Image: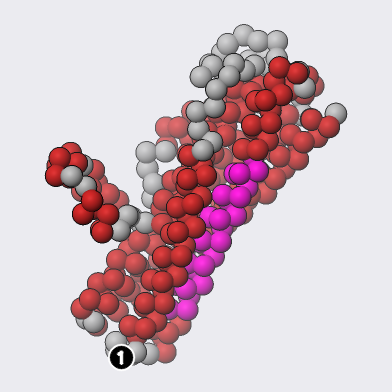
Amino acid sequence: MASFHARSNSLPSRQHPITSQIEENLNRLRSSQSASTSSSLGQQLNGVQDLHEYVEMLLQLPQSQQALSQEHQRKSVEQLLDGSLLLLDVCSTAKDALLQTKECTQQLQSILRRRRGVEGLSGEVRKYLTSRKAVKKAICKALKNLKNMENKDGENGDVITILRQVEAVTVSVLESLLSFVSGPEAESKMSRWSLVSKLTHQKKVASEEDEQNTNEIANVEATLRSFVKSQNIKHVEKLQNELQNSESCIQDLEEGLETLFRRLIKARVAFLNVLNC
């Protein structure tokens, strides 16, 4: 992939403050993507929001508009435009997943406040888990769509390079968010791994188990599955606390995702305005 520092007449001077801010935000986001707790994801969403605000500014510069209007850039521009629409679709899927999970979380909290003990609770727990299964199915489809945005070929001017790097970082953050909301893969998939694969991934699995402790949504689901198996009242007591943490986590992610969604729309409108000039 081309460097930001490559000279080209298609981009404003590399000292331009907008270009510098985009580069700085890209580097910051790349360095923070190894972490996937709710707190780190919130920070990444904020970073991507800022990134697309600068992209909107970049697209308003005459030099950028001139570069994107060149005939030899048409295919790349069309790919980026299609990509921006797909990002909006994936954001909508993520928003729906969070909303559905939050509503089920709130409903379960309400039921726990009204009832004492475990009697009659199993049915409600299964409803929650069924809803989560539908959420994971939608997320799996969205993740596959994001994978289709990778590895675009062709030589590009600097503006195209920057826009593709912004797209790539946005895809990465959305993948992390969707994976967080979905939670760890089902244990049944483990049975399809070869013995060699299991041994190779032992450390990775241990790391994922440690990370789950900071995934509020996954913690709720794990406790509910344990309750279904054991019917132990201790799981219910633990669950009340975890549901509150999960609801708070979802609320924060929803707010960050909603702001990103609006920024993506504005950046797309700016892109369309460039093409219509």
Residue 33 drawn above or below residue 258: above
* Residue 126, image x, y percentages: 37, 77
Q: Nearer the viewer, residue 76 or 263?
A: 76
- Give the quadrant of residue 243: bottom left
* Residue 277, image x, y percentages: 85, 29
The residue indicated by pointer 1 is: 119
Q: Amino acid at mark 1?
A: Glu
Q: On the picture, is 78 further left or further right than 196?
A: right
Identified at 77% across, 36% down, the residue is: 272
> What stretch of residues is rendered in magenta?
84-108
Give the mark count: 1
Residue 89 drawn above or below residue 108: above
Identified at 61% across, 44% down, the residue is: 86
Q: Is residue 203 visible?
A: no
Does the stretch in magenta take in 89?
Answer: yes
Does the stretch in magenta take in 171?
Answer: no
- Give the quadrant of residue 46: top right
Prevailing secondary structure class for the magenta stretch in the rendered image: helix
Q: Nearer the viewer, residue 163 or 55?
A: 163
Residue 82 drawn above or below residue 183: above
Residue 118 drawn above or below residue 214: below
The local secondary structure at tag 1 comes to loop
